[in-house]
Image (cartoon, rainbow, N blue to C red):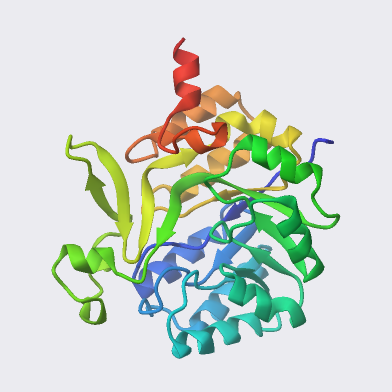
Amino acid sequence: MTENKLRLSLGPNLFYWSRDRLFEFYEEVAEMPVDIVYLGETVCSKRRSLTFEDWMEIAEKLAAAGKEVVLSTLALLEAESEMVTLRKVCTNGKYMVEANDLGAANLMINEGPFATGPMVNIYNPATLKLLAKQGLKRWVLPVELSRDTLADMQAERPEGVETELFAFGRMPLTLSARCFTARSHNLPKDNCDYICGNYPDGQLMKTRENEPFLMINGIQTLSSRTCDLLPEMDEIRELGVDILRISPQDKHTGQIIRLFAEAVNGERPLNEIEAELKELAPLGVCDGYWFGEAGMAQVTAAANAL
């Protein structure tokens, strides 16, 4: 595969931040060296710090700053009221949509090109080809798949479909109808007091040995360690990946994006950039899934230590 110019994307914010915080954050994003920005609530419909109109206002400001804007949908829908919002997003008529479940992808068939997020289980070339016939323009490799699976997918990728890779951030692993954060505070889901707002990077879950294991984020479970694929940049280029996704975190998102931009542009040695990047991962980094190992493993670090 020929080497391509990698672009950077900022994935949708997975956490519950206040309205003011979100507006301030995306004002900063407008000045960051990132090409694509995904906007919208993807985890819980109860998180309404921003309305659909608010998201559209932010989208317009980012588009004016030269960013490609994509509107992201919920990954787990449970009520008709959520379908109302989903239809608004899918029929916005201006920005491409990231479908985070197949229901949203189905709605997009007659609306124009769309993307799929990492929660959509595209595990084989046949699925990728089917969705491409229905208007898929871009897909994000599910975080649990390996580089070998990606190579197989890329070998049969339909023409005109872009591949995006979740390259840095706490990995979105599962969703449930039950709210884990509310349950941990003995609160019912329907009267949760929006307790997840107290955890702007998720609530840490430890093992019995007191080791970090997972992050609880409302109805979502994330990895506690930060997925970091920057050291695999050369192989990622060889595999023909088009876009590297960085997932927002409570602190240092702008600095993380700048370091990735330096790496993509070849401004400094990769190992020098990686040393700085690792310091910005609160509980350390992991890359196991990329190598077909346990997701929380640090395969590159272990190999370098030999």
Would you place residue 10 above or below residue 305 in this image? Answer: below
In this picture, is 39 found above or below 79? above
**Residue 278 as seen in the image, left or right of residue 216:** right
Name of the residue lying farthest toward the left: 186
Q: Looking at the image, which residue sits at the far top?
A: 306
Indicate the position of residue 247 as horizontal and vertical percent values. 49, 53
Q: Can you say whether 303 is above or below 145 in the image?
A: above
Side (left or right) of 176 relative to 90? left
* Picture residue at 69% right of the left edge, 63% below the top: 66
Residue 258: x %, y % from top left: 55, 43
Residue at left 50%, top 73%?
74
Q: Position of residue 65 (x, y in %)?
A: 64, 65
Left or right relative to 286: residue 259: right
Residue 5 visible to the viewer: no
> Quarter of the image holding residue 45?
bottom left
In the rendering, at what x and y percent does residue 203 appear?
A: 26, 55
Residue at image position (61%, 41%) is: 261
Q: How many numbered marks have been drawn onto this rendered protein structure?
A: 0
Residue at the image position 52 percent from the left and 77 percent from the top: 55
Residue 226 at least partly seen: yes
Q: Where 225 sits versus 297, above or below? A: below
- Quadrant in the picture for the N terminus: top right
